[in-house]
């Protein structure tokens, strides 16, 4: 019940009790008035009846005095007093007007009739005395019959007085009792009014208003200080205090929601800053290894709790190769073919588990209950990698959805950076490779040679250089055309490219001249490898337009560091050995001598 309703009820009850108390007090006052009226009526009746009895005795005394003394003054007094007496009906009417009852008036009428009878006897005695018959007169007024009649008058008047006394006493007693009862009721009403007032003060002001307001005030103070840990008390009653508590709860919920939104906004800002920083780092990467290190460091910060792996497409093997991982993912380990991932097949993000049932990827292993996300890394419609993550179990749907957007942005940035690196590598490869044979060109050779020389000199490891020149190459061009010469160059380049396991070790310096760098090869190992290359070239058969071009041979010049001088003069030493091989008849391997190395160094 609402406080306003309770207050109205209490106010109405208080007014009603006050009015009832006033009415009871008026009734008590009326009873007291009745009591006073009864007492006054009794006093009036006593006075009136006493006058009646006194009048009877005075007349009797005047008559007796005249009979005894014969003094005419007594006759005069008697006549005067008798003339002052009223009739019986006048006296009874006067008493009836004062409130005498019928029975009381009947008793009084009887006494007054007897009093009138005595008056007649008195007149007879006075008449007899006036005639001189005093004996008869004394017999009348002093006789026994006269005495008995006088006693009867006194008795009737006494009876009337007794009846008046009884009625007056009953009336006074009833009025007194009524007044007492009304006073008690008035006191009860006043007590009830005071009790109701105290109850209103205690239960409404203190229990229903003061205490809840004090508790709500503390909560409001804490909420004003943005301490949303303050929980408003639960007041289930439907009143103004309950409305205030509900309003404070709504304010707290709004504050918590606003705080949550601010935290999400701050977290979103931090995450976007991380993405921006990662994008800047990715743009500064010079190699795939740099990119992988950036991803490995930033991915756990952008998607906290999401374990994952980064796969890069190896075009030569057509495999997705793991580049790095973070937070120890439990599934999708190792390399796999692109066809085993639905995300790579469809070119879209793929989530095999969750609210929507979908087909799991074949590259997933282990616990099937782990929710995974596969995001393809694409560039110009081509899949160049895969971002694989595993969802943590303690995240809400909103948190997962928000993190998925960051992961898509992360995958987009990684894919763009990886595509840029690949394009840069392709351009570098094009600038460093011979377009005809596919081998590294002279520019690439200079860079690699300087690196190998620095490493060999610092680590004191051997470095072999084998110079190769195709014998009589001009005859292929002259006899079969330049296309035939290009075919020979491509075939020789293929043999040299396969001569070593290491890459970037075979180079075309220009025309029909090639060089093969063999880091870590001592002189004996280098000689064996040169003999193998020579045999493969001799066995090589090249056809052009259905016609075999004839045997292919080459001249070789071999120099080894540190056997044949300083590493920086290794090319000139090998070139000098090649020149001797040509001068000595071609199709042979000539090893540089220490003397040659010394002369070149000089």
Image (tube, rainbow, N blue to C red):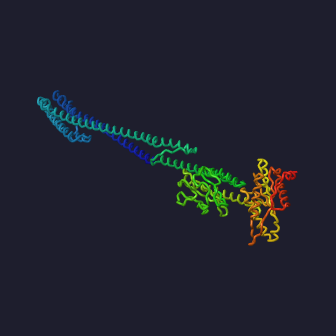
Q: Between residues 168 and 107, which one lies in front from this camera angle?
A: 168
Q: Between residues 350 and 335, which one lies in front from this camera angle?
A: 335
Number of marks drawn: 0
- Please state if 585 lies on the left or on the right of 248 as rendered: right
Q: Position of residue 378 (x, y in %)?
A: 65, 61
Q: Position of residue 54 (x, y in %)?
A: 22, 32
Q: Quadrant of residue 78?
A: top left
Q: Position of residue 408 (x, y in %)?
A: 62, 57
Q: Between residues 236 and 527, which one lies in front from this camera angle?
A: 527
Q: Quadrant of residue 113?
A: top left
Say whether residue 24 is visible. Answer: yes
Q: Between residues 397 and 190, which one lies in front from this camera angle?
A: 397
Q: Position of residue 273 (x, y in %)?
A: 66, 52
Residue farthest bottom in this picture? 546
Say whether residue 451 is visible. Answer: no
- Please state if 489 lies on the left or on the right of 139 as rendered: right
């Amino acid at each position: 019940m609402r406080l306003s309703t309770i207050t109205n009820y209490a106010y109405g009850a208080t007014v009603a009790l006050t009015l009832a108390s006033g009415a009871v007090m008026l009734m008590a006052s009326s009873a007291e008035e009745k009591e006073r009226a009864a007492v006054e009526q009794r006093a009036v009746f006593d006075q009136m009846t006493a006058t009646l009895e006194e009048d009877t005795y005075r007349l009797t005394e005047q008559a007796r005095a005249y009979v005894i003394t014969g003094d005419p003054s007594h006759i005069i007094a008697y006549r005067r007093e008798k003339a002052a007496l009223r009739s019986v009906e006048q006296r009874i009417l006067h008493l009836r007007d004062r409130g005498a009852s019928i029975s009381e008036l009947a008793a009084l009428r009887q006494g007054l009739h007897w009093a009138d009878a005595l008056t007649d006897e008195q007149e007879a005695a006075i008449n007899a005395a006036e005639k001189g018959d005093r004996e008869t007169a004394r017999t009348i007024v002093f006789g026994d019959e006269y005495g008995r009649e006088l006693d009867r008058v006194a008795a009737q008047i006494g009876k009337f007085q007794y009846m008046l006394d009884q009625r007056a006493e009953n009336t006074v007693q009833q009025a007194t009792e009524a007044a007492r009862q009304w006073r008690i009721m008035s006191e009860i009403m006043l007590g009830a009014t005071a009790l109701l007032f105290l109850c209103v003060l205690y239960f409404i002001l203190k229990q229903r208003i003061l205490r809840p307001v004090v508790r709500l005030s503390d909560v409001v103070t804490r909420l004003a200080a943005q301490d949303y840990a303050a929980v408003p008390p639960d007041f289930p009653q439907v009143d103004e205090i309950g409305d205030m508590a509900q309003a404070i709860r709504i304010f707290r919920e709004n504050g918590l929601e606003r705080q949550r939104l601010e935290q999400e906004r701050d977290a979103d800002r931090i995450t976007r800053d991380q993405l921006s920083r990662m994008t800047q780092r990715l743009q500064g990467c010079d190699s795939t290894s740099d990119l992988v290190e950036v991803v490995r460091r930033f991915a756990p910060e952008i998607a906290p709790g999401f374990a994952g792996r980064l796969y890069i497409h190896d075009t030569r093997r057509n495999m997705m190769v793991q580049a790095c991982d973070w937070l120890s993912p439990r599934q999708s380990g190792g390399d796999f073919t692109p066809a085993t991932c639905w995300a790579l097949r469809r070119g879209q993000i793929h989530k095999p588990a969750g609210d929507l049932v979908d087909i799991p990827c074949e590259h997933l292993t282990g616990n099937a209950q782990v929710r995974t996300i596969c995001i393809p890394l694409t560039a110009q419609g081509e899949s160049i990698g895969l971002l694989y993550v595993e969802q943590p179990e303690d995240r809400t749907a909103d948190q997962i959805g928000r993190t998925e957007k960051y992961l898509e942005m992360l995958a987009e940035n990684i894919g763009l950076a990886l595509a840029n690196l690949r394009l840069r590598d392709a351009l570098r490869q094009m600038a460093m490779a011979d377009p005809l044979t596919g081998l590294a060109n002279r520019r690439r050779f200079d860079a690699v040679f300087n690196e190998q020389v620095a490493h060999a000199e610092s680590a004191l490891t051997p470095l072999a250089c084998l110079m190769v020149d195709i014998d009589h190459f001009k005859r292929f061009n002259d006899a079969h055309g330049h296309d035939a010469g290009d075919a020979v160059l491509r075939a020789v380049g293929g043999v040299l490219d396969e001569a070593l396991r290491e890459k970037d070790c075979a180079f075309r310096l220009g025309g029909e001249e090639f060089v093969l760098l063999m880091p870590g090869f001592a002189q004996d190992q280098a000689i064996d490898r040169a003999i193998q290359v020579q045999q493969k070239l001799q066995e090589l058969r090249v056809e052009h337009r259905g016609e075999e071009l004839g045997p292919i041979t080459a001249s070789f010049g071999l120099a080894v560091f540190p056997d044949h001088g300083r590493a920086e003069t290794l090319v000139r030493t090998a070139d000098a050995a090649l020149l001797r091989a040509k001068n000595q008849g071609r199709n042979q391997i000539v090893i540089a001598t220490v003397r040659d190395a010394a002369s070149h160094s000089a």
